[in-house]
Amino acid sequence: MFFKRVFFGGKLEKEVLDLIKEHLEVLQTACETFKLALETDDDSLLSSICEFEDEGDRIRRDIAMKIYEGAFLPYLRPNIYRFSEVVDEAIDKIEDTVYDYQYLKACKDKSLLDMAREDILRIAELNFKASKRLFEAYKALIEGEDLSELTVKIRVYEREVDAIKHRLEEKIRGVDVDVWSALSFLKLLEHIVSISDLIEDAGDIIQIINVSLR
């Protein structure tokens, strides 16, 4: 009873919780769309991801406004707003990754991209899985259920992404490409890996909110 009274509160609180749900749906859809675009080599799917970034920004601003208007008790507000910021940063990084990938696809020398294609797809799959677990963790939080198993899964995905990153960094040393191609590839790698880092951060914030409600 205490949990529901503190967290759900009134009209503003419900509006914020609905916005967070919408935000997480945008993140999950963006991750899935990027994965599908890589699997099918569909440039139109890649281009459509930019729309998710605009939607994510709008939702983050709406959440900030509702919190400013007085949603939630003061001790909850910083973490709830920080959560929306981190989710939005993850959506932004997906867009950055798309631009990097499109640039490398347009380059004459595609040896790095060809070498890393399966690993990049695997990271995209892991990011999508992590976004799904994050959404499930949020729903568990709302229901007052245990979410530790879900956040552990997110961390497991992040560790696998990190291992792939290190493996790719080793591989790139054996590929003879120009400096700009190498730098562009490392930028792509940095952005796609940061998505899983941010999803893990969001999962940690959910755990903090969960503990603060007990």
Image (cartoon, helix red, strand yellow):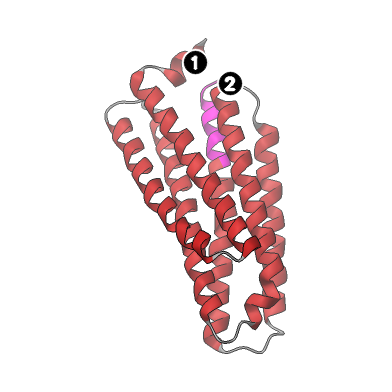
The amino acid type found where label 2 is placed reads Gly
What is the secondary structure assignment of the residue under circle 1? helix
Mark number displayed over residue 144: 2
Q: Nearer the viewer, residue 46 or 20?
A: 46
At 47% across and 52% down in the image, what residue appears? Answer: 91
Residue 105, image x, y percentages: 55, 76
Residue 128 located within the stretch drawn in magenta? no
At 70% across and 66% down in the image, what residue appears? Answer: 119
The amino acid type found where label 1 is placed reads Lys
Q: Which residue is mark 1?
A: 4
What is the secondary structure assignment of the residue under circle 2? loop
Q: Are marks 1 and 2 in contact (CB under 8 Å)?
A: yes
Residue that lies at the very extreme toward the top in this rendered image: 1
Q: Which segment is the magenta one?
A: 203-214
Residue 206 located within the stretch drawn in magenta? yes
N-terminal of the pair, mark 1 or mark 2, is 1
Residue 169, image x, y percentages: 67, 74
Q: Could you say which quadrant of the image residue 28 lies in?
A: top right
Q: Is residue 125 above or below residue 204?
A: below
Magenta span main SS = helix
Crowd class of label 1 (few under 14; some 14 to 19; many from 20; radius 10 Å): few
Q: Is residue 10 visible?
A: yes
At 39% across and 30% down in the image, what residue appears? Answer: 16
At 68% across and 72% down in the image, what residue appears? Answer: 116
